């Protein structure tokens, strides 16, 4: 059976930590930043852990990362 290929679009959007968590960037940091406070922009720029319900879907996409 051939190796599973990593979905490159998923690999660019998600990062896997050493403990196995899948992290993603939060939305809302692309435009309309003038009306947002500095605190809001700072929290939006951080990585956030993905909802655990999405893990089974991404296990196939991130085959070699997990």
Image (cartoon, rainbow, N blue to C red):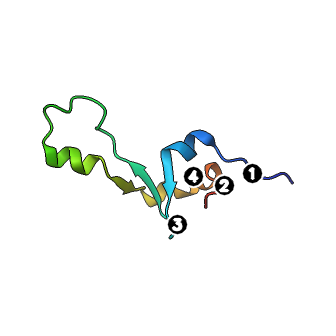
Q: Earlier in the sequence, mark 1 or mark 2?
A: 1
Residue 4 badge: 1
- Which residue is more in the foreground, 51 or 12? 12
Question: Is 66 rendered above or below residue 10?
Answer: below
Where residue 14 appears, as percent x and y from the top left, is: 49, 49
In 3D space, how far apart are the residues under numbered discs 2 and 4 (Cα atoms)? 8 Å
Where residue 10 appears, as percent x and y from the top left, is: 56, 44
The residue carrying pointer 4 sits among few (fewer than 14), some (14 to 19) or many (20 or more) residues within 10 Å by Cα, namely some
In 3D space, how far apart are the residues under numbered discs 4 and 1 (Cα atoms)? 13 Å
Q: Earlier in the sequence, mark 3 or mark 2?
A: 3
Where residue 45 appears, as percent x and y from the top left, is: 30, 47
Image quarter hosting the N terminus: bottom right
Looking at the image, residue 50 sits to the left or right of residue 64; the answer is left
What residue is disc 4 on? 58
The residue carrying pointer 2 sits among few (fewer than 14), some (14 to 19) or many (20 or more) residues within 10 Å by Cα, namely some
What residue is disc 2 on? 63
Image quarter hosting the C terminus: bottom right
Q: Secondary structure at mark 4?
A: helix
Q: Secondary structure at mark 1?
A: loop
Q: Earlier in the sequence, mark 3 or mark 4?
A: 3
What residue is disc 3 on? 20
The answer to whether the residue labelled 1 contacts the one labelled 2, judged by CB atoms less than 8 Å apart, is yes
- Name the front one of labels 3 and 4: 3
- What's the residue at 67%, 47% (across, down)? 6
- Name the front one of labels 2 and 4: 2
The residue carrying pointer 1 sits among few (fewer than 14), some (14 to 19) or many (20 or more) residues within 10 Å by Cα, namely few
Q: Earlier in the sequence, mark 2 or mark 4?
A: 4
In 3D space, how far apart are the residues under numbered discs 3 and 4 (Cα atoms)? 12 Å
In 3D space, how far apart are the residues under numbered discs 3 and 1 (Cα atoms)? 19 Å
């Amino acid at each position: 059976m051939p190796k599973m290929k990593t979905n490159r679009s998923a690999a660019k959007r998600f990062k896997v930590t050493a403990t196995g968590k899948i992290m993603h960037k939060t939305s809302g940091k692309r435009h309309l930043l003038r009306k947002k406070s500095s605190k809001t922009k700072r929290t939006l720029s951080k990585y956030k852990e993905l909802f655990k319900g999405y893990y089974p879907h991404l296990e196939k996409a991130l085959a070699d990362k997990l």
